[in-house]
Image (cartoon, grey):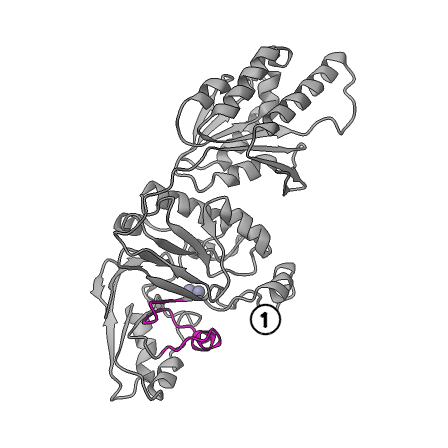
Amino acid sequence: VKVQLLGTGSAEGWPNPFCDCASCSWARTHEVRGQSAALVDDELLIDCGPEIPRAATRLGISLSRVRTMLLTHAHPDHLGPQALWWRSWGRTAGPLQIIGPPAALDVCRPYLEPDDPVELVAVSPGDVVAAVRHRVTALAATHGGPEIGPAVLFDVDHTLLYATDTGPLGEQTLTALATDYAAVLLEETLGTAAPTPGHAEHHDLAAFGETVAELRRRRAINDATRVIAIHLGHGNPPGPELARRLASWGAELHPDGTVLDLPDRGLMSPPPELPPRRVLVTGGTRSGKSLFAEQQLAAEPAVQYVATAPPMPTDDEWSRRIAHHRDRRPATWVTVETGDLAALLARPGPPLLIDCLTLWLSREEVWADEQAVETLVAAWQATSRTVIAVTNEVGSGIVPATASGRAFRDALGRLNAAVARASDEVWLVVAGIPQQLR
Ligand SMILES: [Zn+2]
Ligand SMILES: [Zn+2]
């Protein structure tokens, strides 16, 4: 199956032609994205915003072979019905089947000539339709009301899931998904911009990670599935930063025009055995290192969160800090309170997030116990799990006033260096911006 991304941008594209924010300025000089649409095997077009026919032409593609058009909803960035006129003037345009929700078909009707060989097929969520060459399932989107649809997402042959526009998926959709899609085109409209009204009807970057995690839990996707972010808007950070965020979740960012060669269903290769991934994240206090570490695992179906802090029941400020961190973590994460990190690392299981090594070292005089440190480093080196450990970058600030403070600082410096040596990735977070050291 060949899937070509005719566009990967949000309604107004990225950049917004009328905007000079940092994100739009970056996009204008590096990567211009138009309205989102996809073309399957040159004959099934999914969404047809007003920019799409010209985008196809500029990519060197003829749309004359399109026999089926899937429409997700009637918002004007997904449906420019004038295209049906332009199409009817083509000399080689054959019959066309348009599949979409009732409101989208209503938008098309005024643009159909009486003798046009066009068939309109209304769908609602749950319907399965035989398209010319494909089996298409409509699924409920979390997007707008009946006046634009009701909006749907499309499952094509249980191979491709086309999921825009939508906020986080509802239970009805999650249970109707197939398993092991070859590719999922999932919208990520809002990026990291502050929440805007109506943002429940689109994904921001954090919600995208959560949806990917949910798709993994439901086995709709596996490690071989290509998950691609589309419908991208200027709330997103510049491309390389966005690509890095997506890559940490196993998701991809591609320019308009990209062709995906997907295996037909049944030829799906089994998910590859993933090598262990040992990640050390260091940074100063309030640098954003914990948030960065959490984001790295946000698309995992399950995570064990290891709280290494010794209990401090009498300290209110401390308890509030801990509670704040806990509230930020997804409900599916399990918290383990232990100082025995080596035992956890030796056991198979879901990814581990250790937050943090500094507190672990401060427990029960561990910092003075060289054996305990060596055992931890050996377990880190030998683990088969995905594990991310957060630590503090100390030593560049003021010199501790006490001898034990100085000894602790030195012990942490040595521990960080030893763990870093045995890590596959090492990150330094400064002012909320992660820098990859390895
Ligand atoms: Zn849209
Ligand atoms: Zn929309």
Q: Disc count in the image? A: 1
Name the quadrant containing residue 61.
Answer: bottom left
Q: Is residue 7 visible?
A: yes
Residue 13: where, in percent of width, then height? 52, 67
Residue 162: where, in percent of width, then height? 36, 59
Name the quadrant containing residue 123.
Answer: bottom left
Q: Residue at x 23, y 58 (%)?
A: 126
- Nearest the viewer among 244 and 432 is 244
Q: Which residue is drawn at 61% across and 66% down?
A: 28
Q: Is 48 covered by the magenta stretch?
A: yes
Determine the secondary structure under disc 1: loop
- Nearest the viewer among 431 and 56 is 56
Q: What's drawn in magenta, residue-wise? A: 38-63
Q: Is 92 covered by the magenta stretch?
A: no
Q: Is residue 200 left or right of residue 289?
A: left
Quadrant of picture, ligand 2? bottom left
**In this view, 188 is above or below 351:** below
Residue 300: where, in percent of width, then height? 42, 39
Badge 1: residue crowd in 10 Å (few <14, some 14–19, many ≥20):
few
Q: Mark 1 points at which residue?
A: 17
Residue 348: where, in percent of width, then height? 39, 26
**In this view, 63 is above or below 139:** below
- For badge 1, the amino acid type reads Pro
Name the quadrant containing residue 402.
Answer: top right
Does the Cβ of the disc 1 residue fall within 8 Å of ligand 1?
A: no
| Quarter of the picture holding the N terminus | bottom left
Q: Residue at x 47, y 53 (%)?
A: 252
| Quarter of the picture holding the C terminus | top right
